[in-house]
Image: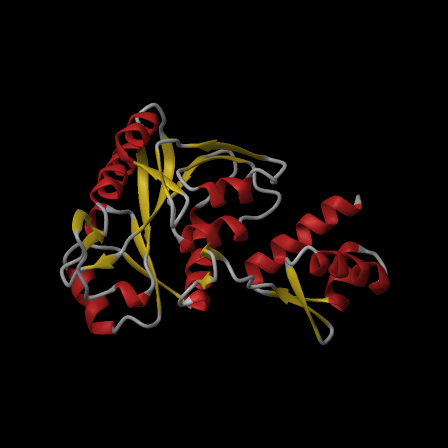
Amino acid sequence: MLKEKRLMQIFDMLCRDGEVQISRLSKDFGVTEMTIRRDIEQLVRAEKAVRTHGGAMLAASPIKVKENQTVSNKESKIAIARKALSFIRDGTTVFIDSGTTGQILAQCLPMSAHLTALTNAVAIATELVNRSFVSVILIGGELKADSLSCRGPAAEEALSRFRADIAFVGVSAVGRNGELFTGSVAEAGLKRKVLSAAQQCVVLADSSKFGRQSLCRFADAREAAALITDGGVSPERIEALEHSGAHIIVAK
């Protein structure tokens, strides 16, 4: 097996399982442990992995939405992104919304994935364009300075030309009755366009977003194929949302 293909498969295992063991990889690939150590060292230099005793774990690199601002609830968002991977199939067209959870999802996407990716976020497009088997389409429009994402009528017009098999959408808040909010009128318009452009939509929202409101309501959770969150949401709130028709998935 070529080294490049082996590296991609090791990184895919890291994204899927969170960690790998050198001895197991050596047996799986039929190479020496020293060869696997060199592979892991290369992933470490690329900031994709962190060495552990006897193996490596996926690097949770500090994604920044603007200078000197790191991601809040990063571990929860990584868990949500990993769970979202189960919805992605080779050969499909996906839309990944701007926002830190979407960016983490892009980082966790297996290097061997074959798909077309639509996004309105410069950082997500930059992450995915380096994937050998991903075709990236950046949706243009008014560029928002703090998130480097496009929005507004021009972005909506650009998006209307495309169709996606699945869209991953972020939110600013999830109301008590499953209302989905964003903090910008322009972003609300684009998110509504995304809902109409995709065959199914998956909402990504960590537990800090629940039980809140923001400026613009653009949809309800029951309109999505699923809403993925983390274990910080109370069972009572999840039960109430599911009773209203929403499909809630808790990432652990």
Residue 57 location in percent, x, y?
A: 63, 67
Which residue is at the far top?
161
Location of residue 51 (image quadrant): bottom right
The front one of 18 and 145 is 145
In this rendering, the answer to whether 163 lies above or below 228 is above
Which residue sits at x=52%, y=62%? 62
Which residue sits at x=50%, y=39%? 125
For the C terminus, which image quadrant? bottom left
Left or right for 206, reference 242:
right
Which residue sits at x=68%, y=55%? 46
In this rendering, the answer to whether 198 lies above or below 76 is above
The front one of 26 and 154 is 154
The answer to whether one can see residue 1 in this image is: no
The front one of 192 and 63 is 63
Left or right for 58, reference 220:
right
Location of residue 251 (image quadrant): bottom left
The answer to whether one can see residue 100 in this image is: yes
Residue 142 location in percent, x, y?
A: 33, 35
Q: How is the image coloured?
A: secondary structure
